[in-house]
């Protein structure tokens, strides 16, 4: 049986945009739910298209990687299941679908700002430490087509 190896290099393709309180974009998020893209060490290309943004994020079913412009250095690596499990413990036991992952990431970002679920959402201190937290105040997110 022919086995096709999982990719080791992908292009950054945003699925979510986050905008600050002045409606200015500050974060694009590439979300890939498939186990095909679950390697924590995927090389991600074409991020330079988004140099005007302070942050980029890549999320898959295992890891969330946050990059900072202008050189797109990886500044944080977070466990996706820690975040998903916080909001819905049952979600980490089964298959995670694209729509589920999109929803949970947006919910987590809103919780970091509004604390609707918890005063201490997952990775709050890390998000503050890397400078992303200040952008999340009164931020909005939307899915891209």
Image: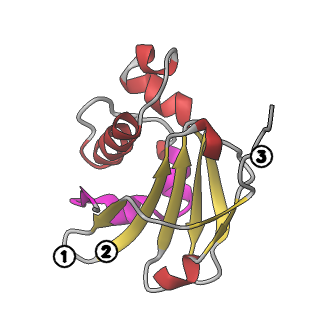
On screen, residue 104 above or below 133: above
User: Can you say which quadrant of the picture contains the N terminus?
Assistant: top right
Question: Is residue 11 left or right of 27 when viewed as pictured?
Answer: right
Q: How far apart are marks 2 and 1 (CA)?
A: 9 Å
On screen, residue 54 above or below 135: below
> What residue sits 46% from the left and 51% below the top?
31
Tag 2 and tag 1, C-beta contact below 8 Å: no
On screen, residue 78 above or below 142: above
Reading the image, the residue beneath label 3 is 5
On screen, residue 69 above or below 122: below
Instruction: Look at discs 1 and 3 and give the one toward the viewer.
Output: 3
Q: How far apart are marks 1 and 3 (CA)?
A: 44 Å
Answer few, some or many: residues within 10 Å of disc 1's Cα (few below 14, many 20 plus, some between 14 and 19). few
| Extent of the magenta region | 125-143
Secondary structure under badge 1? loop
Which of 89/114 is in front? Answer: 89
Q: Position of residue 77 (x, y in %)?
A: 64, 49
Residue 22 got which mark?
A: 1
Which of 72/15 is in front? Answer: 15
Secondary structure under badge 3? loop
Residue 25 got which mark?
A: 2
């Amino acid at each position: 049986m022919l086995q096709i190896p999982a990719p080791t290099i992908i292009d950054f393709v945003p699925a979510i945009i986050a905008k600050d309180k002045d409606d200015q974009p500050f974060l694009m998020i590439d979300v890939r739910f498939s186990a095909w893209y679950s390697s924590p060490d995927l090389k991600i290309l074409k991020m330079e298209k988004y140099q005007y943004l302070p942050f980029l994020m890549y999320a898959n079913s295992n890891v969330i990687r946050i990059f900072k412009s202008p050189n797109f250095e990886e500044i944080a690596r977070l466990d996706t299941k820690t975040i998903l499990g916080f909001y819905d413990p049952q979600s980490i036991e089964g298959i995670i679908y694209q729509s589920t992952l999109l929803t949970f990431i947006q919910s987590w970002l809103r919780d970091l700002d509004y604390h609707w679920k918890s005063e201490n959402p997952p990775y709050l201190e890390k998000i503050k430490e890397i400078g992303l937290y200040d952008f999340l105040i009164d931020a909005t997110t939307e899915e891209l087509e």
